[in-house]
Structure formats: C-alpha cells, structure tokens
C-alpha cells in the first residue's frame, strides 16, 4: 500500500457490509471496520479516532483470509448452477452442512484474517481461571461457569466475554465448539468483575434429523471462555450424566 509507505501512522477505515480482502493488513497499524454508519458516520468515526469513545464491538462473523477458506467456495458450491428454465434463479448446494463461519475454520484448521468475535479496545483485559459449580449435571439441571475479568489498562472499557461448548464425543458430526452465550462487562481501570454463564441441557443439544428432535447425549463436555473464536482464555470440563445409569 503506497499510502502506508508515506505515512506509517495510517489508519484504514473500511466501510462495507461484509468481509473484504486485506493484503495490506500487516502494513498498517490500525483498521476500523465501520460497516454502514448512515448520517452519523462522521461523528461516530471521529469519536473513535480521537479516543472520545473506547470501542468494544466484536465481529459477528469470520473474515476469511481467502475465498478458498470459505466452505462454499472450497467445495465448489458457489455460485451454483442456473436453472434450465432460465428463470434467473440459481440452484445452490450447501454441502458444508452446519460447518459455516468459525465452525468451518475450526474444522479445516484454517487461520482466518479476523476470527468471529474479534475486536480490540483502547484498554486491555485479563481473564482469570474459569470455575464451575459442579463437575456433573443430570438432564433437566443447570450448572454455572464463572470467570473473573480485569481491566489491566488505563482507560474504562467494555469486553465481550464469549462462552463456547465442546462436545468431546457425539454420534453425529458436531462443530469443534459452538457459541452458547456472551456477555459485555464494563470495567474501570484496575477493576475486576466476575462473569457468570448458566449452562442447561439445551446448550448441550444438537438436532437429530432422523429422530426429528433435539438430543443431549451423555458424556464429557468443555465450557470454553474466549475473547474470540480463536482467542481461548480458559476452559473447564464437566459431564452430562446418563440417566439410565442412575439409581
């Protein structure tokens, strides 16, 4: 990027509704994903750029490093085949099944340009060790996972803490991990707060198309606390008990 060679302090503001290629990413010190801000674009961007507001947004989807890292492209599904009746409608297959976004990059072990849930701040946050209130749960019960979050910087800011669940063994294919909750916590410099997530049977379930029902299979699970889909901070294991083995 020619501008970056002239000014090493160049900030790129990207206005788009989707991911774009950024071959120059490592040549600039800062990138702001602005989406479509409407009539208040100038004021909102000025507030961020001058530091009046401390950003705390997180990406709602994965920015792939290349089209080949997107399932629809890698599997040859996009753009599909035009219908024979020349209706202008395209028939597209979805052979990636449930493995889209961060689920696809996890499965393929692909490094994204920016992961789902990514976002930076003018302050920094430290995640403590996750604690669980019990190691085993039965169908119909809940358990809680608690993690302390500390603002280790010099400015007040907010962090979006994310909870993912991993099923270590399943009778049907499942993602490596699945987002099951998130919570935005606002902290002053040096302040620590505990963030708590409640996990129920629904958070452990998957849809079985043959049985046409949501199923939570007994076994071992992981509760994963992360700052993004690739920035895992702490995790803890627990077991969903098999009711048939209980007295």
Image: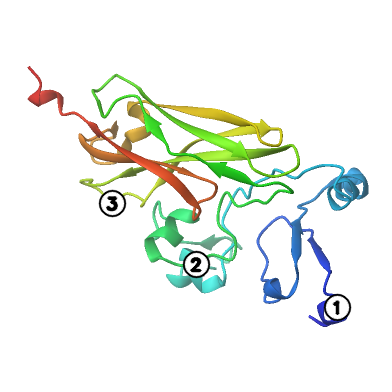
Residue 174 in the image: above or below residue 69: above
* Whole-number angstrom distance, CA of label 1 to CA of label 3: 47 Å
Residue 35 x %, y %: 76, 52
* Whole-number angstrom distance, CA of label 3 to CA of label 2: 21 Å
Earlier along the polypeptide chain: callout 1 or callout 2? 1
Extreme residue in the front direction: 190
Q: Residue at x 84, y 69 (%)?
A: 10
**Residue 94: in sight, yes or no?**
no
Q: Quadrant of the N terminus?
A: bottom right
Mark 1 near mark 2, Cβ–Cβ under 8 Å? no
Mark 1 near mark 3, Cβ–Cβ under 8 Å? no
Which residue was labeled with disc 3? 173
Extreme residue in the top direction: 247
State the residue in front, 94 or 25.
Answer: 25
Residue 118 x %, y %: 60, 52
Q: Which SS class for mark 3?
A: loop
Kindly identify which numbered label has been placed on residue 3. 1
Q: Which SS class for mark 1?
A: helix
State the residue in front, 201 or 24.
Answer: 24
Which residue was labeled with disc 2? 111
Residue 146 x %, y %: 45, 29
Q: Residue at x 46, y 28 (%)?
A: 197
Q: Which SS class for mark 2?
A: loop
Name the image quarter holding residue 47.
Answer: top right
Label 1: few (<14), some (14–19) or many (≥20) C-alpha neighbours in 10 Å:
few
């Amino acid at each position: 990027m020619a501008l970056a060679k002239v000014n090493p302090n160049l900030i790129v503001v990207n206005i788009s509704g989707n991911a774009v290629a950024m071959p120059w990413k490592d040549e600039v010190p800062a990138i702001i994903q602005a989406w479509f801000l409407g009539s208040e674009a100038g004021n909102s961007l000025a507030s961020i750029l001058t530091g009046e507001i401390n950003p705390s947004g997180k990406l709602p989807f994965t920015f792939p490093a290349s089209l080949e890292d997107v399932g629809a492209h890698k599997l040859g599904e996009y753009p599909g085949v035009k219908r024979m009746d020349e209706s202008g409608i395209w028939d597209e297959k979805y052979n990636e099944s449930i493995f889209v976004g961060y689920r696809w990059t996890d499965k393929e072990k692909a490094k994204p340009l920016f992961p789902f849930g990514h976002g930076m701040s003018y302050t920094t946050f430290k995640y403590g060790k996750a604690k669980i209130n019990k190691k085993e749960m039965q169908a119909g019960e809940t358990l809680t996972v608690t993690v302390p979050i500390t603002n280790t910087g010099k400015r007040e800011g907010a962090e979006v803490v994310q909870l993912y669940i991993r099923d270590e063994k399943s009778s049907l294919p499942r993602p490596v991990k699945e987002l099951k909750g998130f919570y935005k916590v606002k902290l002053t410099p040096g302040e620590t707060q505990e963030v708590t997530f409640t996990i129920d049977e629904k958070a452990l379930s998957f849809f079985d198309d043959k049985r046409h029902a949501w199923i939570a299979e007994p076994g071992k699970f992981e509760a994963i606390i992360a700052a993004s889909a690739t920035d895992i901070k702490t995790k803890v294991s627990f077991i969903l008990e098999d009711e048939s083995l209980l007295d």
